[in-house]
Image: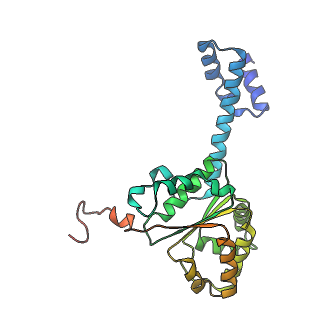
Amino acid sequence: MSQLSTLQDTLKSLRFGETANNLPALLEKAEKDNVTYAAFLMDILSYEQKKREEKQIEKRLKWATFPYYKTLEQFDLNEQQSMSKKEFNKLKELLWIEQLYNIILLGPPGVGKTHLAVGLGIQAIHQGYKVIFTSMGELIHTLKTEEITRKSQTRMKRIRKADLVVIDDLMFMAINQDEANLFFHLINDLYNTSSIILTSNKAPKEWGELLGDPAITTAILDRIMHRAEIIHLNGDSYRMKHRTSIFGAKTASN
């Protein structure tokens, strides 16, 4: 066995798999740059650390189950006049996660609520936080089947351990009292342990109409609103404004 193979096997036994696979290139670069032993050792450690971080981010992005990958850099503030650059940057800093603040994004369909929520979630993952994205409909289904299926149990375990939980389309549909009760218990579990981003086209004062039970509504609102920032996104639907047509430049109005 060659010295290179022995080195690679030793690195793999130490769980430096990424470095082992790229060792020939790292050695070639070190010889070319005539680096010191200390610098070469630092290069190896830095390379392995970088690759592990990339794999961790990749895994957390997979677990987050975002509906699409859209970053904050892709969010066009010019399309959303109701939010200032200062407010946007403050959200982007993510200090509110450390402070266990909740973010409530309100507005009509198509104004960028989900895109902003996904972008914040992706930003959080790149800063080392555990994030889960779920629609309200999917969440209720998962809560109802938690005691029945292993898939739902795994999903709920990840939700309860997340640093940031994104619940999209809150109150999009009415839920019954049993479902509202399950939702309350989840909010209670997350209270003081995780931050939540909620998107909704209905203001909190209207949530009672869909939750049904006034007592449960009050209890849910009490925990969500204790530390929360409400952001109103207004304007025309971005999807409608930038929609495409199978007839090229023609639209329904032509």
**Residue 77 seen anywhere in this rendered image of the structure:** yes
Note whether 35 is above or below 203 in the view shown.
Answer: above
Q: Position of residue 199 (x, y in %)?
A: 54, 69
User: Relative to 66, is 182 on the left or the right?
Assistant: right
The one nearer the camera, 1 or 240, is 240
The answer to which image quadrant residue 56 occupies is top right
- Kindly identify the residue that appears in the image at 60 percent across and 84 percent down: 208
Q: Quadrant of the C terminus?
A: bottom left
Q: Position of residue 235 (x, y in %)?
A: 39, 68
Q: Position of residue 82 (x, y in %)?
A: 43, 64
- Kindly identify the residue that appears in the image at 59 percent across and 13 percent down: 32
The one nearer the camera, 135 or 215, is 215
The one nearer the camera, 97 or 65, is 97
- Kindly identify the residue that appears in the image at 70 percent across and 86 percent down: 215
- Kindly identify the residue that appears in the image at 70 percent across and 77 percent down: 184
Q: Position of residue 120 (x, y in %)?
A: 56, 56
